[in-house]
Every structure is written in C-alpha cells, then in structure tokens.
Image (cartoon, coloured by chain):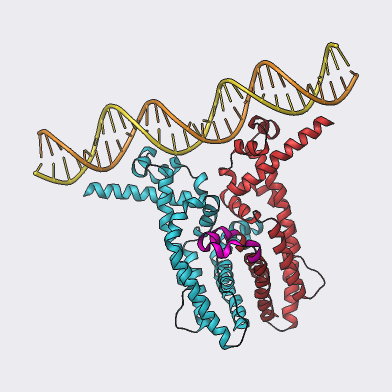
Chain colours: A red, B cyan, C yellow, D orange
Amino acid sequence: MRTEKRNQTKEDAILQAAEHEFFTKGFDGARTTSIAKNAGVTHAMLHYYFKTKENLFDIIVSKKFEILVNMFLVTVSSSNLSLEVRLKEAMESHFNFILKNPELPRFFVNEIYSSPEHFKLIVKILKPKIKKTFKIAQSKLDAETAKKHKEKVDVRHIIMDIVALNVFPFIAYPIMQILFGKEFINMTNFMEQRKKETVETMMCRLQKII
Amino acid sequence: MRTEKRNQTKEDAILQAAEHEFFTKGFDGARTTSIAKNAGVTHAMLHYYFKTKENLFDIIVSKKFEILVNMFLVTVSSSNLSLEVRLKEAMESHFNFILKNPELPRFFVNEIYSSPEHFKLIVKILKPKIKKTFKIAQSKLDAETAKKHKEKVDVRHIIMDIVALNVFPFIAYPIMQILFGKEFINMTNFMEQRKKETVETMMCRLQKII
DNA sequence: AAATTGTTTAACAAAATTGTTAATAACGCT
DNA sequence: AGCGTTATTAACAATTTTGTTAAACAATTT
C-alpha cells in the first residue's frame, strides 16, 4: 500500500502543478518539463503517469469544466424565493465561486476559443441539462412579467449581464493593474466593492423589468 | 519605387497574417511558419523583414494597443451633454468599436496576463493620459451626485460595468456557441440585442445614482 | 528468497520550431 | 550595360520540447 500512496502523491503533485501551468499559460504556453519540475518529479515520470501532454490537459479540463457548469446551473436554476431575493442570491454565490477560482474564467475563455475540439465531448453530455435549466428560468421570468403586464424579456440577456458583471473584473484584472497600478493593487478590497456594485446594478435592472 | 511597393505588399501581407495568427492563437500558439504560409511568403522572408517572432509581435501589439487605449479614453472622457446622453453615447461608441474589432479584447486580456512584460513600455507612455481622464470623469460624477444630494460613487465601478457588459459577450461568445449552439449562432443579431440591453441596464443604474 | 509488479532515473530519439547563411535574382540608377 | 542595393530562395543550424527506452531500484506476493 505504501507504493500506491507514494504514487498518489506524485500523481497529485503533477496534477496540481499541471493545473497551475495550464491555467496560467494555456495549453501552448505550458511546458511539460516545467510542470514536472514544479511537481518535484523528473519529466520522464510525468510521461510515465500521464503519457502525453494532451492527456494530462484533458484530465484537468474535464474535471474543472464540470465544476464550472455546475456552478453555472446553480446560478441559473430556480428556487421558491422571490425573484429579487433569488437574483441577489444567485449573483452572490456566482461571484463567490469565481472569487475562489479566479483563474478559471480566463482559462476556459481562452482554451475554448483556441481549441474548441477539446471540449466537444464534455459539452455534449451537459448540453441537455443546460438547455432545460434555461427554459425553466425563461418561463419563470415570463410568468413574472405577465403578472405585472410588462414586456417579455429574454432571460439569456439577464444571465449574460450577471455573468459579464461578475466575471469580467477577474478577467480584466491584470489590465487594470497595469493601467492603474497602485489604485487597483488591493484586489480583495476592490472585488468586495465589485460584488456590491454588481448586485446593485442588476437590482436596478430587475426593478425595471418587473 | 516598384521595389518598395513589392516590399510593402509583402510586409503588409506578413503583418496581416501575423495579426490574425497572434490574435487567434496567442503568442505561444502562433507559428512563424504558418504566418509566412498564410502571407504567401517563405518563412525565411518573414525573418528577413521582421527578424524575430517577438519583434513581429511587438509591432502588432503596440499598433493595436494604441487603438484600444484611444477608444477607451473616448469612452471615458467627457463632453458637454447631459450625463444620461453622455453615458448612452459612450456605451454605444464603445460597443461599436468592439463590434469592429471583436478579437481585440480576448487577445489583450490573454497576452497581458501571460506576458505583461510585453506591455510595460507602451503602458508607461499612456498611463498619465489615462489617469487624468479618470480623474476628470470622477470629478464630473461627483459634481452631479452632490447636486442631487446623493452618495458619492466610484467612477471606476461604473466604467468597469460598462466595459464588462460591452466586452464580455464578445469574449464569451465561443462558449455560448458551444453551449447553446443554434440559438446563439446568429451573432450579429444577438449582439444588436446586447447593445440595447447593455444601455438599458446602465441607464437603470444611472437613474439610481443621480 | 525468488518472482512479479510497479516505480524511477538518466540518457537518448524524434519532432517541431525558430533563426541563419550563402548563393542567386531582381531592381533602380548612372 | 554595369553597379550597388535590396529581395528571395533553399538548405541548414540551433534550440526547444515532447516523448521513449532500457536498465536500476523498490515493494509486494507467493
């Protein structure tokens, strides 16, 4: 059993180092040698455990992608609370999730763009779930607007607003830092403010809709 | 003079092909051979004209970066119209600019993140201009909130909201397409709707502020 | 303890990619 | 036409990076 344990830790070390390498540098920028180095193993070991760079990448991506999609579904899916409370709740949990995984959005945005073929498979599995969730959200919103005799609103745009306001600051943060320096250096502080601002903005929007 | 003309077209062809290659695949993913191929020249020619991959990259980046920053400044800088009209105007021109350069945001977000050193120089030049613009925008907003006896608002967040709402859909579009397929395929249509939605959302926000 | 299985290393092979060079061609100019 | 300059090509050098292998080593089982 001690053998397995040792393997496990080495495998894990490689996975962890690889995650960081891929997330920060993308598939093309990542180097298997530097992953091995950061994991504290020889690069032959990396190939022994994971065969190829692509395979290692796929393992990491599929794991994280599921987390991402689940989070997304949690954000969109409905509860029994009022729309206002529900929206606020969804936005905050979405924001908190990104705060815990700040590298994730940039990584996916890039990799899906530069090599969508890596994702075709996993997307196929999750698509029905996503579509269903969207339909439910749309019908709930429709019911609400009908009740108040207001115009119908495309829920995709509302969700896009939420995701944009929540995600973009994390994606754009390096730019902010480079453009503004000191004023943006305190990230956690700025992001705390962002959470409030984002919710505020969407609450205004919601009040107009219903 | 015919020589110059020939050079010019070859150089331009390389620059154009390189722009597309770098924008879609990033610095690491870009291949000088494939740039040369797409430009219809041998890859020795590419090195003859531009020496190194990095140099070629820098030329393209500095050109585009200035366009980007100028656009940004136009969005932020003030005019004599009312704040409401001004905001709407700024958002629409910002949005239209991205519509014309849809690859730009993703590219910069990526490259600044993965190799900020490429940008340090050009940023240094533009920083004072940016800071000044921000200060002016902040003071105008302060004047407005004071007039209506409302709370002060950090203009950085307002600008972040605008940029996020405008830019994110373009960055996230490949994800949308992969997740929703048909429903998102008509990009121009969706983006036209986005422009309206984005403005609408920010107008709601503005009404609360002043 | 011998055999089996799995782990590790170092050295190496293969491929891809960037960059160079030396020889040649085209061009504009006097 | 002949000269110097610039453009072009093909072959190749250098480097980087991924991937392999054979042999040594460790642990586990029988």
Image quarter where the N terminus of chain A lies is top right
- The image quarter containing residue A37 is top right
Residue A148 drawn above or below residue B32: below
Residue A1 drawn above or below residue B26: above
Left of B109 or right of it: where is A46?
right
- The image quarter containing residue B190 is bottom right
- The image quarter containing residue B51 is top left
Q: Which residues are magenta?
A: A171-189
Q: Is residue A115 visible?
A: no
Q: Position of residue A178 (x, y in %)?
A: 52, 59
| Identity of the residue drawn at 24% across and 46% down | B3
| Identity of the residue drawn at 21% across and 50% down | B1
Q: Nearer the viewer, residue B136 or B74?
A: B136
Q: Is residue A184 magenta?
A: yes
Q: Position of residue B182 (x, y in %)?
A: 62, 60
| Identity of the residue drawn at 46% across and 51% down | B20
Left of B209 or right of it: where is A144?
right
Left of B192 or right of it: where is A125?
right
Q: Is residue A118 magenta?
A: no
Q: Main secondary structure of the magenta part?
A: helix
Image quarter where the C terminus of chain A lies is bottom right
Q: Position of residue A23 (x, y in %)?
A: 63, 48
Q: Is residue B25 visible?
A: yes
Left of A65 or right of it: where is D14?
left
Q: Position of residue A30 (x, y in %)?
A: 59, 42
